[in-house]
């Protein structure tokens, strides 16, 4: 069994759904035994949406390294830094479109480009609805390039009782997809 700790990038865009980003950062704190480092890039819009939707600025309190959206000196702006996974949560359709067309105009899109070119795990928790054909085609392009589209479509069979538990049904899937072991609800398994 491989005990290598994961270097992971988390990008937070300005799409509605800051609760997903919060739950993801909370979960990653509990998985530190599997993680070497977490680099976080938040857009200015993401910070504004977090403040508006969650009524706080607690993203500043997480024990992760935060990078400016234009910091191309961040280690994960290059494949040589060996970050093995990236989760964009939530992922706006604009960010998806830039990734799909190879436009690396900020740290988030550059990091996603690096992850794809190095054939590593890229998970996009897309949040917008409804989707137009451009969005769908961009999702197809990113999927064909090796990315994983994980829509922010919560499940209900774990019987969540609050918004954080509901968001966790999506976040836990993304955590599974990047290869971290996470104690979460599993359909019809006795250890739940």
Image (cartoon, rainbow, N blue to C red):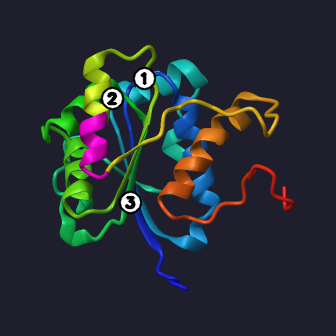
Residue 162 drawn at (x, y percent) = 77, 29
Label 1 element class: helix
Residue shown at the point (62%, 66%) measured from the top left: 181
Left or right of 181: which side holds 92? left
> How would you rate the neighbour count of disc 2 (Cα within 10 Å): few for under 14, some for 14-19, many for 20 or more?
some
* Residue underneath mark 3: 85
Residue 100 drawn at (x, y percent) = 21, 37
* Residue underneath mark 2: 44
Residue 142 or residue 63, whichever sits in front: 142
For marks 3 and 1, give the CA distance: 26 Å
Work out whether mark 2 precedes mark 3 in sequence or the reverse, and give the earlier one: 2
For marks 2 and 3, give the CA distance: 23 Å
Left or right of 135: which side holds 6? right
> How would you rate the neighbour count of disc 1 (Cα within 10 Å): few for under 14, some for 14-19, many for 20 or more?
some
Label 2 element class: helix
Residue 178 drawn at (x, y percent) = 47, 59
Number of callouts: 3
Q: Which residues are magenta?
A: 140-146
Callout 2–callout 1 Cβ contact below 8 Å = yes
């Amino acid at each position: 069994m491989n005990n290598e700790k994961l270097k992971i990038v988390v990008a937070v865009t300005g799409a509605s759904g800051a609760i997903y980003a919060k739950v993801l950062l909370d979960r990653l704190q509990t998985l530190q035994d599997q993680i070497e480092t977490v680099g976080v890039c938040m857009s200015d819009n993401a910070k504004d949406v977090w403040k508006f939707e969650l009524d706080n600025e607690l993203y500043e309190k997480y024990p992760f390294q935060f990078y400016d959206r234009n910091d191309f000196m961040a280690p994960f702006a290059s494949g040589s830094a060996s970050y093995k996974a990236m989760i964009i949560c939530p992922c706006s359709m604009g960010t998806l479109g830039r990734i799909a067309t190879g436009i690396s105009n900020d740290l988030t899109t550059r990091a996603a480009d690096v992850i794809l070119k190095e054939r590593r795990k890229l998970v996009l928790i897309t949040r917008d609805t409804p989707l137009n054909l451009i969005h769908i085609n961009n999702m197809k392009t990113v999927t064909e390039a090796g990315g994983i589209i994980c829509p922010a479509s919560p499940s209900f069979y774990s019987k969540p009782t609050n918004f954080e538990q509901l968001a966790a049904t999506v976040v836990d899937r993304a955590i599974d997809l990047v290869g971290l072991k996470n104690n979460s609800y599993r359909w019809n398994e006795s250890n739940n």
